Amino acid sequence: MELLEKRIQRDGIVKAGNVLKVDGFLNHQMDIVLFNEMGKEFKRLFADRPVNKILTIEASGIGIACVAAQYFHVPVVFAKKAQSVNIDGEVYHTRIESFTHKRVYDVIVSRKYLGPEDHVLIIDDFLANGCAVNGLLDLTERAGAAVEGIGIAIEKGQQAGGKLLRGRGYRVESLAIIESMDEKTGEIRFRR
Ligand code: 5GP
């Protein structure tokens, strides 16, 4: 998606450890006009899929998922990072290792909001090694829900997540795929 690539080129900052900072329009301040175009694009890409729910994870996925949901006319469920988990049968639970924070989170979704009747589109801001998406896939599997696709704003193509997920047969659509980024020069190249 050209609009997103241009914005990454303009405002993205390459940090040490293969991290792209996009706080100016996606991860802290959010450009809703851009989000709207992203939502429209997700709808175009998954128009053939019978999506009845969007699943994301707090915090950064929520804004993108909500704007996209207006095009799908479906509710958004976000997986919550729980401080302590009381596995009392009311929630599905999984564990996700955070790429940016280097720690493991317990993540839950209430059984009330995800079940075997659901056809889920997973949406997140970044795809790197795939831990976050794998956790969301685990939750949908526990719920017996069908995965209709995975929509990502920025995929870091130099990391393994996208390849692994596509290899497992999932339809992954990323609006921008980074081929390489250079911490020293700040240069960012996209896969086309
Ligand atoms: P993964 O779980 O695929 O390794 O990483 C994806 C998650 O880590 C996303 O939910 C995102 O929040 C965070 N993340 C991974 N790489 C980056 C990055 O380069 N920049 C930012 N801002 N977040 C990232």
Image (cartoon, rainbow, N blue to C red):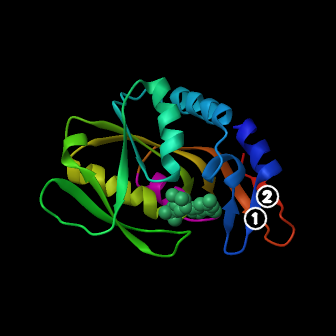
Looking at the image, can residue 172 be seen? no
Give the SS element for disc 1: strand
Residue 14: mark:
1
Q: Residue at x 54, y 31 (%)?
A: 45
73 vs 159, left or right, is left
Residue situated in front as seen by the camera: 24 or 138 = 24
Callout 2 amino acid: Ile
Percent across and percent down for residue 76 are 38, 37
- The 10 Å Cα crowd at callout 2, few under 14, some 14 to 19, many 20 or more, is some
Q: Where, by quadrant of the figure, is residue 135 drawn?
A: bottom left
Residue 23, horizontal then vertical, whole percent:
68, 54
The residue lying at 44 percent from left, 26 percent from top is 72
State yes or no: discs 1 and 2 in contact (Cβ < 8 Å): yes
Q: Residue 146 location in percent, x, y?
A: 29, 41
From the viewer's perspective, is the residue at label 1 or at label 2 nearer? 1
Q: Where does the magenta region start and end? A: 158-168
Q: CA distance from mark 1 to mark 2?
A: 8 Å
Rendered-image quadrant of the C terminus: top right
The residue tagged 2 is 188
* Magenta stretch contains residue 161: yes
